Amino acid sequence: MSYEILGISVLWIFLYGYLIVASIDFGAGFFAFYARITGKDHLINRLISRYLSPVWEITNVFFVFFFVGLIGFFPDAAHYYGSALLVPGSIAIILLAIRGSFYAFENYGSKKNIVFLFLYGATGLLIPASLSVALVLSEGGFIVEQGGVVTLQYLELFTSPLAWSIVALAVTSVLFISASFLAFYASRAEDKPALDLMRGYALFWSTPTIIAAFTAVLYLSQHNNRHFQNMMDLWWLLGLSVVFFLIVLWLLYKGRRYGWAFICLMLQFLTAFFAYGIGHYPYILDPYITIQGGATQEAMGIALVVVFIAGLLLLIPSLALVFRLFLFDADYVKGKK
Amino acid sequence: MVVDTVLWSRLVTGLTLSFHVIFATIGVAIPMMVSIAEFVGIRKKDNHYTLMAKRWTRGFVISVAVGVVTGTAIALQLALVWPNFMQLAGNVIALPLFMEVFAFFFEAIFLGIYLYTWDRFRNPYLHWLLTVPVVLGAAMSAFFITSVNGFMNQPEGFILEAGQFTAVHPLQAMFNEATPSKVFHVLASAYMTGAALLAAVAAFSMLKKGVTEYAKKGLKLMMTVLLLFSFLTALAGDVSAKFLAEHQPEKLAAAEWHFETEKGADLIFLGWLNAEREIMGALHIPKALSFLAFSDFNAEVTGLNEFPVDEQPPLLVHYLFDAMVGVGFALLAMSAIFFLLLFWKKRNELNRWMLRIIVLGAPLAFLGVELGWFYAEVGRQPWMIRGYMRVEEAATTSPSIVYLFFVFLLLYILLGTMCVIVLRRLFRDNPAEVEFEKAAKAKEQALQAKEAGDRA
Ligand code: HDD
Ligand code: HEM
Ligand code: HEM
């Protein structure tokens, strides 16, 4: 495998990782706020702070990792996306900042403050929405280079049904993933009321998610037929995704094996995400950056891959330790420690 | 209206970095202090030190969050505000940037574990061991980012061909000649600043509430660390100056208003320039500049006039440099005096004046870090990558950058204020002595419960 392909595969796997861990976090923000205004916060807030507070920094590093890695492997991406995204990117920074500060200050009063809780919930939906725009842009047609100046076509972007359908998909997926995870966590904590609540949310958000997914694919076929056709060639991956989705629904509906339900949900998103990503090949930004043309120098590419492997050898055991302590340690989960 | 996008880009970057570096310095230094305190606590079986480690960590968590938030901002801004810089230099410096993220990962993971496992290990050294990856992770992230900055000053490890960097050697770029002296200086000054901060906190509490055993131990421990690292900082500063004299003479010359190349050059402290660029009212230390630059009182030091006018850094950096050096010697003197008073039995090292000065030491140390970076960054002007890319070639062309400056300014003011409020609330409502009593009582109860359990 050439180093460019290796590089983009690594990045795509990391983006997938971010998608899962960040969705759990983002969605929890919305649920915390929603539960508060419907008077059910006592059911789930402890659950949320038990799991999320220790790991939010790790979640954030996933994002930085993807971003820094993308620019490292494909420096041209800095030029195009960097120039075009100054304003939207800065808005995303501010939203991330607001959210990060919630965790910093939560133990000391902000959790009780309704304004802060509102911001926490709102950013939980706005951040995935704004980040998903980067995926929309990569489809081409929104970033234009003329005479060396790169600009973003705001009007086209805001009137594009593709953009809105991808944003809708991002938001619904976040809520679906998060609710399923929290249901699993509640079941481990043997917290029946929280479990019932989260299971209800998960079931509720499953349908909009799948509708949004089909809508996005539909609009993709109109906007970028090449990408759509490539995805259709991977029909079996998409089919698998639907099968996993049905298993998730069934398990949630029956109300058992929440661990398996969440694993199937991760597989559902994995297959769909890779069908989308492989279909995107060879472009990073259609039509300006391709994986081969935009890649960094070979020596750097190889150095990055080596570091990546060494880094993983360091991180996987450490992450396993975190999971053992916070996710699979039954006493911790139940709040006895 | 034409917007000077280059100027505003510089302002945005300077703003974000100046804010980030406060928290970055805390992020590098406090884990080290926590580690030291916890270790001393276990060694001496003294719960005061353990409590110290706990309380410092609790405050630290809040500042980490701001560090992470602002760090994420600067990482994104590097691409958003300087897209051409990242496109060109990304080929060469991606490696340390990428490795930095691994260092963060490592630090974040173990910090998370450390925080939530205070009472989960039987052997206290096991919990202490968790500080090691946190301290290392923080130091590594400082190392990697400083090596990127080193590259901007001393670009190496590539060939420029048709506007592109080719034949890239990532390791050579990372271990450029600026890296060792810079990393040494950055780490030493960070640890020094952390010690100054915690010493100031202890001194402040003594001024407010009188001398307690807890505060006294904290103060003495941190003053020891401060003495050590203020000495190392000055040493590292000297190493940095020697580096500059050899590789970036225009930066040193601008800092010293050293215009003509000469042997046995004077060190010039403060003063001002008249219309003919003559130095007025300055303190001259004969031949000291030659010594600072080459360890030889008669060595030849390159003057600023050797460089084309449009490649000379602004002369303002003289004051930045002098103030930084001033801070360095002030802190060194302060810690030395403290120990003189301590060992000189008739004197009380905890007199109110000494304590007041120690409180002042904390803002002074942070000022030193800021001044040092301003000197390093402004002194690189007009270059972005020295000798290869000018600042104006690298900046974004979007005029929105002006609004973004004010938006970010507002954001940092908000974050800073929140951070201070939360920290104050955290420690004011929960004094150390009360917590100490509580912890002791809880331990006793746990022991009794255990004994009862064993008997049953
Ligand atoms: C409280 C912090 C502090 C203190 C007391 C000092 N410095 Fe410093 N200095 C820094 C904090 C700093 C810094 C923030 O860490 C810098 C900015 C960039 C860098 O590499 O380190 C720096 C840069 C810096 C540079 C420029 C390096 C470069 O651009 O490559 C020189 C020559 C010195 N210092 C020299 C000194 C000397 C001779 C000091 C005498 C005591 C001194 N510094 C005290
Ligand atoms: C953290 C401490 C730092 C502070 C306080 C700081 C401060 C500043 C300031 C004030 C400027 C504007 C200089 C001018 O325009 O005259 C600047 C520019 C810049 N700095 Fe730093 N800096 C820091 C560290 C770094 C590091 C570690 C890097 C490298 C990754 C870096 C990269 C840049 C870049 C790319 C610019 C813009 C180009 C320029 O104006 O020279 N800075 N910084
Ligand atoms: C000498 C200057 C710098 C030092 C010593 C430094 C050090 C640190 C440290 C220790 C942290 C962890 C936060 C904490 O524990 O408090 C941090 C956060 C961060 N810094 Fe800096 N930093 C510097 C400048 C920069 C620059 C120029 C960049 C941009 C490339 C940057 C990018 C980041 C990022 C992305 C984070 C957040 C990482 C996360 O998500 O956990 N830093 N920095």
Image (cartoon, rainbow, N blue to C red):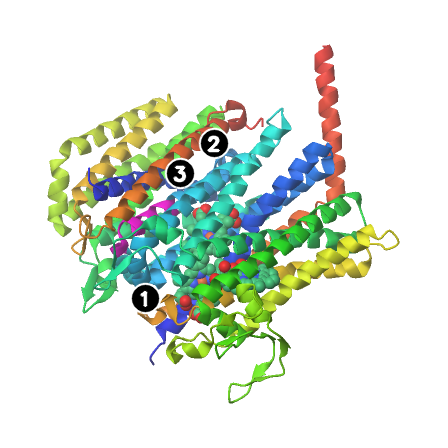
B415, above or below A26, in the image: below
Locate the C terminus of chain A and report the quarter of the image it occupies.
top right
Query: Alpha-carbon distance for marks 1 and 3?
Result: 45 Å
Dot 3 falls on a residue whose secondary structure is helix
Chain for numbered disc 3: A
Callout 1–callout 3 Cβ contact below 8 Å: no
Callout 3–callout 2 Cβ contact below 8 Å: no
Mark sitting earlier along the chain (3/2) = 3
Residue A255 vs residue B38: left or right? left
Does the closest atom of ligand 3 sit within 8 Å of the Cβ of label 2?
Answer: no
Dot 1 falls on a residue whose secondary structure is loop
**Which residue in the protein does label 2 denote?**
A322
Residue B137: image location, x then y, percent:
49, 42
Identify the mark at residue A331; answer none if there is no mark: none
Q: Residue at x 14, y 34 (%)?
A: A235
Residue B340: image location, x then y, percent:
79, 55
Chain for numbered disc 1: B
Label 1 Cα crowd, 10 Å radius (few <14 / some 14-19 / many 20+) = few
Residue B218: image location, x then y, percent:
72, 46
Query: Which marked residue is nearer to the observer: mark 3 or mark 2?
Result: 2
Residue A93 vs residue A105: left or right? left
A265 or B185, which lies in front? B185
Q: Residue at x 76, y 36 (%)?
A: B437
Label 2 Cα crowd, 10 Å radius (few <14 / some 14-19 / many 20+) = some
**Which residue in the protein does label 1 denote?**
B388
Q: Residue at x 48, y 44 (%)?
A: A37
Q: Amino acid at mark 3?
A: Ile
**Which residue in the protein does label 3 denote?**
A24
Q: Amino acid at mark 2?
A: Val
Instruction: Name the dominant secondary structure of the magenta segment.
Output: helix
Question: What span is in magenta?
Answer: A63-77
